[in-house]
């Protein structure tokens, strides 16, 4: 049996469907979640291959120790052999704790299904290389990088069963939570518009945001731009920021330093807009435009709007 | 407060990544090693700030061989009081975390800090594993940490936002951007680091649950297609028809 943990605190995201589809390729899937998501939303996981959804409404997921206990008890009750997480903040915190509790080998940042030998590909060296990981333990945990596989719809809504696990009392008290509304979380975004120091100042970001809105894309930036406070830290992509692999990455006024490329070269298609024909980013690009961002970006935005209207 | 900071060796961010022994080993030839940036910039510096404000002790720990002593001295030069090297090759995250936990169990720390991930294996695994083994609370991806007696107030990243949480020490916290500013070691620090204690401790017998069987470099990109800056309609059409991404 395959258990897929779903973080439903913001509703069901695309990466949840990806994890279910991934699990379905490995065997029969039970989904497990917690908190207050609506039963209709949860039942939709059946359309991607879950045979049922278990939900513990009592715990909200803020305490990693409680979540670990919840998942471990579901593993024991359902003789689960493989647990799948999305490699988001839960995959990065709860999956390692579960690994120790179950003595189960963990593959984090997986980008492929297990091959015939059971080895899974992961991104290593911050996207500069791939590694094949073999898990030696009987129970295996896989934390799947968002945008690595396409979710596949192949079923219908499934039953949702409420459960309560013995998870003890929380050791972490939440004082406040801040969730910006409406923004697309960067690691999950399929389209990303990103800009760097070439934009000269924070007051020039309106054209970047306009283009992002026209495309339905998330916004990102290079490290110096976040460091000097032109843009928020969570937009910083690269080796020491967020690593992303969208379908489309548009880099505006970014030179393409090796540390920047490390975090974005998993993107399927890269467009580079830069005044300098020698900018290293052109070597990593699929489409290049040598030109001034202040002219090219508004023109591109117009072209996108024209395309969307047609 | 008694603080343990876990550090790891990582190839310098400009290193050319290559593999040897039929793509089964990272080729260390000509590679300059640094302290993993998240461990150094955020975990270590914040630990030092906490000590400077409220007293205590900052110990750094790593699992590695004698070749790791250089990065250990660097961390000592930045200001840690002493260092422990668990003498073994770090086989996988589980192996590493179990070594560190077994040392931590004997030596009772109030706080264990790590970077949010290493820039070579990007696993984000070790911190959570240590917390689970020690059975203490774990806060991941912290961007702020304040200590008041044994109460810890931590700002952390959550899916799609930020959260401020409170918990009691002992705890394990993984540190991300925002925690602290990088410190460049000065001459006095570098001199002092030479004589600070570096305890080499024999490793425990522990299995590894995972192994890297091979590595590969990503496929080379095909040549870039240049587009006339005046003709953005062409780009949009290519993105739609050729690349099929919009
Ligand atoms: C340990 C370490 C870790 C690092 N990690 C990261 C990381 O995670 N992410 C990251 O991004 N960087 C990282 N860096 C920094 C990296 O080395 C580069 O310094 C940084 O990426 C450069 O940012 P940039 O491209 O925005 O700025 P610049 O290098 O200054 O490039 C600006 C570009 O804009 C172009 N330009 C100027 N005007 C215009 C215009 N009008 N229109 C169009 N183009 C224009 C220029 O030709 C130039 O190519 C790291 C560095 C170190 C040492």
Image (cartoon, grey):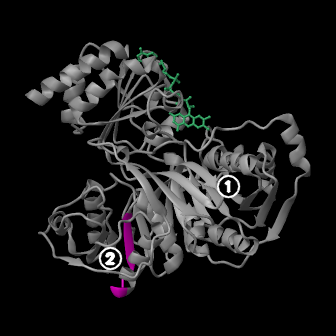
Q: Is residue A299 left or right of residue A234?
A: left
Q: Nearer the viewer, residue B205 or B175?
A: B175
Circle 1 SS class? loop
Q: Can you give x and y, in whole percent of width and height, for residue A12 in the image?
A: 24, 58
Identify which residue, A164 or B220, lies in the foreground. Answer: A164
Q: Which mark is residue B8?
A: 1
Mark 2: few, some, or many residues within 10 Å (few <14, many ≥20)? many
In the depicted view, which residue is nearer to us: A69 or A221?
A: A69
Left or right, B113 with respect to A301, comes to right
Q: In this picture, which residue range is highlighted in magenta?
A: A77-85
| Mark identifier at residue B164 | none
User: Looking at mark 2, is its residue's CB closer than 8 Å to ligand 1?
Assistant: no
Judged left or right of residue A216, residue B112 is right
Residue that carries the numbered disc 2 in the rendered image: A2
Give the structural element (helix, strand or loop) at label 2. Answer: strand
Specify the quadrant of the image occupied by residue A36: bottom left
Q: Mark 1 — on which chain does it sit?
A: B
Given residues A307 and B107, the one toward you in this image is B107
| Residue A11 included in the magenta stretch of the image | no
Task: State whether residue A224 is above or below residue A160.
Answer: above
Quick check: do tags 1 and 2 share a chain?
no
**Residue B63's x, y, as percent?**
71, 63
């Amino acid at each position: 049996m395959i258990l897929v943990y779903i973080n439903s605190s913001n509703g069901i995201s695309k990466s949840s469907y990806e994890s279910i589809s991934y699990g379905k390729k490995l065997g029969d899937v039970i989904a497990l979640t917690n908190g207050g998501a609506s039963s209709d939303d949860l039942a939709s996981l059946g359309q991607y291959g879950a045979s049922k959804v278990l939900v513990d409404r009592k715990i909200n997921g803020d305490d990693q120790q409680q979540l670990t206990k919840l998942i471990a008890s579901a593993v024991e009750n359902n003789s689960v052999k493989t647990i799948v997480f999305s490699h988001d903040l839960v995959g990065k915190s709860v999956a390692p704790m579960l690994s120790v509790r179950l003595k189960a080998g963990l593959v984090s940042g997986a980008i492929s299904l297990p091959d015939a030998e059971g080895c899974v590909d992961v991104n290593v060296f911050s996207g500069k290389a791939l590694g094949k990981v073999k898990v030696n333990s009987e129970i295996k945990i896989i934390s799947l990088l968002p945008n690595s596989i396409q979710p596949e719809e192949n079923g219908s809504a499934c039953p949702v069963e409420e459960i309560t696990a013995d998870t003890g009392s929380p050791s972490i008290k939440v004082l406040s939570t801040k969730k910006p509304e409406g923004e697309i979380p960067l690691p999950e975004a399929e389209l990303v518009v990103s800009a760097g120091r070439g934009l000269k100042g924070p007051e020039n970001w309106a054209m970047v945001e306009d283009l992002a809105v026209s495309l339905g894309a998330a916004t990102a930036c290079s490290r110096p731009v976040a460091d000097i406070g032109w843009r928020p830290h969570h937009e910083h992509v690269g080796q020491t920021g967020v690593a992303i692999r969208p379908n489309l990455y548009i880099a505006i006024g970014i030179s393409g330093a090796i540390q920047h490329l490390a975090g974005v070269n998993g993107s399927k298609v890269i467009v580079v807009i830069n005044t300098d024909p020698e900018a290293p980013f052109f070597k990593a690009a699929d489409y290049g435009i040598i030109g001034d961002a202040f002219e090219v970006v508004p023109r591109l935005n117009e072209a996108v709007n024209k395309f969307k209207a047609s | 407060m008694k603080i343990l900071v876990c550090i790891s060796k990582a190839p310098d961010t400009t290193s050319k990544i290559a593999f040897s022994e039929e793509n089964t080993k990272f080729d260390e030839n000509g590679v300059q090693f640094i302290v993993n940036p998240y461990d150094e910039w955020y975990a270590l510096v914040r630990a030092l700030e906490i000590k400077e404000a409220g007293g205590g002790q900052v110990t750094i720990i790593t699992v590695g061989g004698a070749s790791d002593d250089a990065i250990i001295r660097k961390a000592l030069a930045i200001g840690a009081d002493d260092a422990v090297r668990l003498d073994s090759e770090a086989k996988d995250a589980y192996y590493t975390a179990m070594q560190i936990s077994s040392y931590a169990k004997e030596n009772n720390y109030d706080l264990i800090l790590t970077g949010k991930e290493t820039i070579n294996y990007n696993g984000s695994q070790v911190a959570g594993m240590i917390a689970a083994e020690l059975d203490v609370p774990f806060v991941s991806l912290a961007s702020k940490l304040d200590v008041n007696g044994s109460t810890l107030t931590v700002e952390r990243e959550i899916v799609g936002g930020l959260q401020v949480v409170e918990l009691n020490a002992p705890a394990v916290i993984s540190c991300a951007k925002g925690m602290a500013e990088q410190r460049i070691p000065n001459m006095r620090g570098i001199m002092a680091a030479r004589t600070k204690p570096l305890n080499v401790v024999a490793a425990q017998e522990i299995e590894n649950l995972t192994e890297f069987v091979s590595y590969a470099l990503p496929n080379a990109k095909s040549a870039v297609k240049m587009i006339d800056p005046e003709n953005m309609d062409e780009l949009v059409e290519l993105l739609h028809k050729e690349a099929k991404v919009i």
